Image (cartoon, helix red, strand yellow):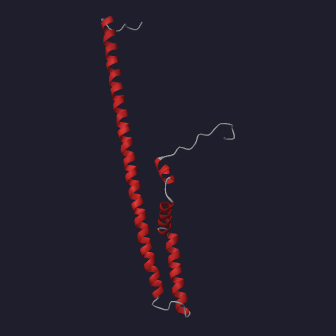
Amino acid sequence: MSTDGLRTPPALKNWHSAHTDALTFGERSADRLRNFMGSWGFVGGFILVMALWAFANSVTKGWDPYPFILLNLFLSMLAGLQGAILLISAKRQDSIAAALAQHDYDTNVSAKKDIEQLVKLNEQQCRMIEELHALIRSQNPSGPAAPH
């Protein structure tokens, strides 16, 4: 209830918000990871971690001396994981696009039926108006009365 005592109507759910509410945990996780890995924050953090890794292992006698074999292993694993996450997300986007296209088609079919009914109704009204004009002309053959 609002402060003026009137009830506020519930928010309308559109197709997308209803679909988003039905996502599984895995689908939500794939979307979050995709959104994170495709952000500038991820790119900046990734570059920072790589620079710190190289610095720590070059200046000191670190755990992964130059040519950074362990870092290459981690990067390869990250690339494989990113590829899988992107494929999962792309599959989801395809299913969303297909469902949205079907929803649009169903809406268009419904609108076409409504428009056809309105056109028929309009044609009936036009015929009725013509019949009324013909009836008025037949009752008053001299034409409409002149204004006085």
Image x and y of residue 20, in percent: 49, 54
- Residue 92 shows up from this direction: yes
Which of the pair 130/93 is nearer the observer? 93
Residue at the spot x=49%, y=73% of the render? 43
Residue at the spot x=31%, y=9% of the render? 137
Q: Quadrant of residue 112?
A: top left
- Residue 140 shows up from this direction: no
Image x and y of residue 131, in percent: 32, 14
Q: Quadrant of residue 88?
A: bottom left
Q: Is residue 143 above or below residue 22?
A: above
Q: Is residue 144 above or below residue 120?
A: above
Image quadrant where one finds the N terminus: top right
In the visual, does 63 lie left or right of 145? right
Image x and y of residue 32, in percent: 50, 64
Residue at the spot x=37%, y=8% of the render? 146
Which of the pair 142/3 is nearer the observer? 3
Image quadrant where one finds the C terminus: top left
Residue at the spot x=65%, y=36% of the render? 6
Which of the pair 147/73 is nearer the observer? 73
Q: How many marks?
A: 0
Q: Is residue 120 above or below residue 129?
A: below
Image x and y of residue 41, in percent: 52, 70
